[in-house]
Amino acid sequence: MTIESQLADHRRYLLRFARLQLRNDAWAEDAVSETLLAALTRPQTFGNRSQLKTWLVGILKHKVIDILRQRQREVSLTQDEGDGSEELEALMFKADGHFARPLADWGDPEQELNSRQFFEVLEACTDRLPATMGRVFLMREWLELSSDDICKELQLTPTNLYVQLHRARLRLRECLELNWFGNRPAR
Amino acid sequence: MRLMRTCKEAAALMIAREDRPLPPIERVALRLHLAICKACPVFERQLLTMRNALGRWRHYTDE
């Protein structure tokens, strides 16, 4: 298999992650193209498919950070107005601060966490986050940046960052409970 | 000093803990709340499951 066809093989996967992180198709295409180009101009041989993939994902992450840095203003200034976060908190908690309804016991889903179906639900839930919230959340969870670094890259105040992350995690929890844990596919 | 936390406040602390260390006073307040609350330990386990799930997802390379 030539390097070109191996790269074509991975393109779709890389694009999925770039889109999820950047929330902008043109930026995602740029990041992936630059990643594939970097692989082509590097006369390095890769032992197997998964080594190449790991290497590509590593490069993609750097390209994505570059783009987030260049687009910093566009990324951090977009506000997700009326994004439903307050409504979600009002649904979850009563006025006195107690949970409004009992939480589902998710059990010990060791096996399920490795299933492809589960990752599809997790990705769909992540994709459903409003743009700014989703970017910030994935910088933390996919790019694995520290809170300090995210603030620096996006010129966000820590308070602003924590509000976004708080909302993102609450929503993700709600989405997983509705679409997976509360309603597991029959197996 | 007020050490009692509502479930909503405790949940916010547990979420914050995913991204930053809590100040000592908040850690104590959270531990106290978890000891007397039925719902919040469930929430805590859910967050732990989410943390594990995101970790697996991050390193999931199968297609």
Image (cartoon, rainbow, N blue to C red):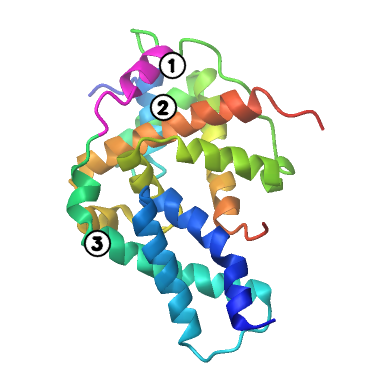
- The amino acid sitting under disc 3 is Arg
Circle 1 is placed at which residue position?
A92
Where does residue A168 sit, x and y in percent of width and height? 39, 36
Q: In the displayed structure, does residue A167 sit left or right of residue A117?
A: left
Q: Quadrant of residue A171?
A: top left
State the residue at coordinates (46%, 14%).
Answer: A99
The single residue placed furthest to the bottom in the displayed view is: A43
Tell me which numbered mark, 3 or 1, is placed earlier along the sequence. Answer: 3
The numbered dot on residue B11 is: 2
The single residue placed furthest to the right in the displayed view is: A187
Where does residue B36 sit, x and y in percent of width and height? 49, 19
State the residue at coordinates (52%, 28%).
Answer: A175
Query: In the rendered structure, are the residues bearing label 2 and label 1 in contact, judged by CB atoms less than 8 Å apart?
Result: yes
The numbered dot on residue A69 is: 3
Q: CA distance from mark 2 to mark 1?
A: 11 Å
Q: CA distance from mark 3 to mark 1?
A: 35 Å
State the residue at coordinates (28%, 35%).
Answer: A163
**Label 1 is found on which chain of the structure?**
A
Seen from the viewer's position, the closer of residues A4 and B56 is A4
On screen, residue A18 above or below A121: below
- Using the rendered image of the protein, determine whether residue A62 is visible from the camera's viewpoint: yes
- Element assignment for label 1: helix
- The residues colored magenta run A80-93
**Label 2 is found on which chain of the structure?**
B
On screen, residue B4 above or below A129: above
